Image (tube, grey):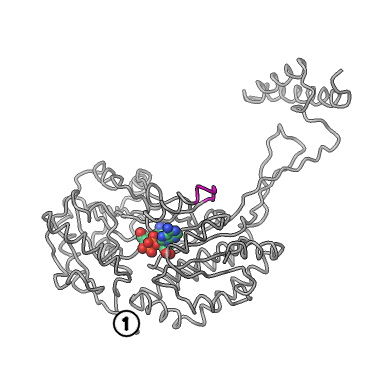
Amino acid sequence: MNYIQKAKDAFYENKNISIDERLKWIKSIKNWILKNENKIVKSIQEETKKSYSDAYISEIFGVLEHLDVLLHKGKKYLADEKIPTPIVLMGKKSKLYKDPLGVILIISPWNYPFYQAIVPITSALITGNSVVYKPSELTPLKSLLNEIFSVNDLINRGLVQIVHGDGSIGKELIDQKPNKIFFTGSVSTGRKIMEQASKNLIPVELELGGKDAMVVFNNSKIDRAIKGATWGTLTNCGQSCTSTERIFVEEDSYAYFKEQLLLNFKKINQDVDSDGNADIGLITSDTQVSIIADHLKDALEKGAVQLTGHDWDFKSKKIPPILLDKVTPEMKVFNEETFGPIAWVYPFKSTEEAIRLVNDSPYGLTASVWNKDIKFAQDFAHQLEVGGVSINNVMLTEGNHELPFGGVKDSGIGRYKGQLGLYSFCNLKSIIIDGNHGKTDPNWYPYTQEKLSLFKNLTQSFFSGGLTNFIKFAINGLKLEKLSNTLGKKGRS
Ligand code: NAD
């Protein structure tokens, strides 16, 4: 079946739907979510084995925040915009349209199956596109997503199609030539998608993996940073692209930090609960369990010391929080994305060393820096090769849905969310309107020696600056306009 063609047909049929109508869809989706929160959490838990609170806080709350940005700001962000026009183009007006691209193919992973569905789908819809959505085969949320996108008949009208299956169906959909691919997932799949998309020059947005660093200076509220580290490493049982996977602590605070983090790890309550009392749930994917086991074995073989979580059998999806000591850069756990509840702390001596440690990674998603001196922390953030930095907090750039989200290096290409992120789903169309109906532009034919000489004078005076030059520019401009109009009427003699 050609899902992309069906979506293209739906796109053309619905092309003239106003932003107000599209906002009504977003409102219906929001209302449906508010009314059905328990049902949503139950479906997420069934497929992912998250704790109730993890599912509720990271998926439902985040989605509602995003929908509110669309509802309150979407119309403004997507309105035609006046753009300044330089004086050399006097008499003309410039505008920017935020038109849709057509069909957006969205391919998602399993770690936040609700959030990773609703946020990109609604971003694509509000900008006027139609959507083909392929969830992870591990977390299809089948009936739930069908129900949500049945509001305002979006599925029946072909504006949203949900296509289930594994990577092979993803590949087929790319061959059907969507207008853009919005992919969230692993680096290795991201590479394959970009390669396949390049054959038809399909633009891609890639939201890929991470190995996010936390940098804690002596001059910070250390106890708060330790609480942040506990949450940042363990939230969603470590299965977040922006999980804290590398903790660098300034030498004098290192021993205390490690000791307290260990105490916190021992207090974590792990369960797939229904009352909200569990901190973390389980690992969702068998493949991920194998990766985590491989990283742990590799670290232990190379001399790391396991401080907690000894009861894990390297097979069960119930992986407890594991804190490692004596980790070195030769270990997989130091460099590769682990995506599980494993943490380690590494000391640093100087600011320069901390910058080098953060940047010495193929990944560049987000990072956090902890320092009471906010000016210093902001300067430090400039030095990091990442897409976002939380200062004295962790994983919080994602918490503001007005901020664009995305990574650099192997962590991906592009930004979504917020005003700038919304434009990832748009054809940013430049418009220029000429009010000078009867005139001949100076750069139009015929070219003559006299015209070129005036053009040169105009160029020199315009770009040299200062009042005298501005007056020369105005005089030259008038002469050039007059000559152009005369030549335009007469033509080349
Ligand atoms: P994955 O790459 O294995 O799969 C992601 C999706 O791609 C799935 O729907 C899968 O069926 C599909 N797919 C697989 N092969 C394909 C192909 N050749 N063509 C088209 N589609 C294909 O990733 P995963 O294991 O589901 O998710 C975990 C990864 O996602 C982690 O690396 C994590 O860091 C990353 N992630 C990134 C972000 C972000 O915003 N940067 C957010 C969440 C997860």
> Measuring 24% from the left and 55% from the top, which residue is drawn there?
247
- In the image, 74: left or right of 345? right
Mark 1: secondary structure: loop
Tell me the quarter of the picture where residue 405 sits.
Answer: bottom left
Task: State which quarter of the image contains the N terminus.
Answer: bottom right
Residue 476, given in percent of the width and then of the height, sits at 75, 22
Horizontal arrangement in the rendering, residue 180 relative to residue 115 (left or right): right
Image side of residue 87 versus residue 490, left or right: left
Which is nearer the eye, 402 or 466? 402
The answer to which of 366 and 179 lies nearer the viewer is 179
| Left or right relative to 341: residue 470 | right
Amino acid type of the residue tagged 1 in the rendering: Asp
Q: Residues within 10 Å of mark 1 (few under 14, many from 20)?
A: some
User: Of residues 467 and 442, which is closer to you in this image?
Assistant: 442
Read off the magenta span. Answer: 197-203
Where ligand 1 lies, by image quadrant? bottom left
Do we see residue 184 in this rendering? no
Q: Against 202, is 241 above or below?
A: below
Location of mark 1 (residue):
273
Could you tell me residue 404's position as x and y percent? 48, 55
Identify which residue is drawn at 54% across, 47% down: 201
Is 380 situated above or below 56? above
| In this view, 102 is above or below 329 | below
Which residue occupies the extreme front position in the image?
1
Q: Position of residue 20 (x, y in %)?
A: 67, 67
- Residue at the location (50% across, 62% down)? 106
Q: Residue at x 49, y 78 (%)?
A: 144
Q: Is residue 189 visible?
A: yes
- The question of residue 275 being in magenta is answered with no
- Tell me the quarter of the picture where residue 463 sits: top right
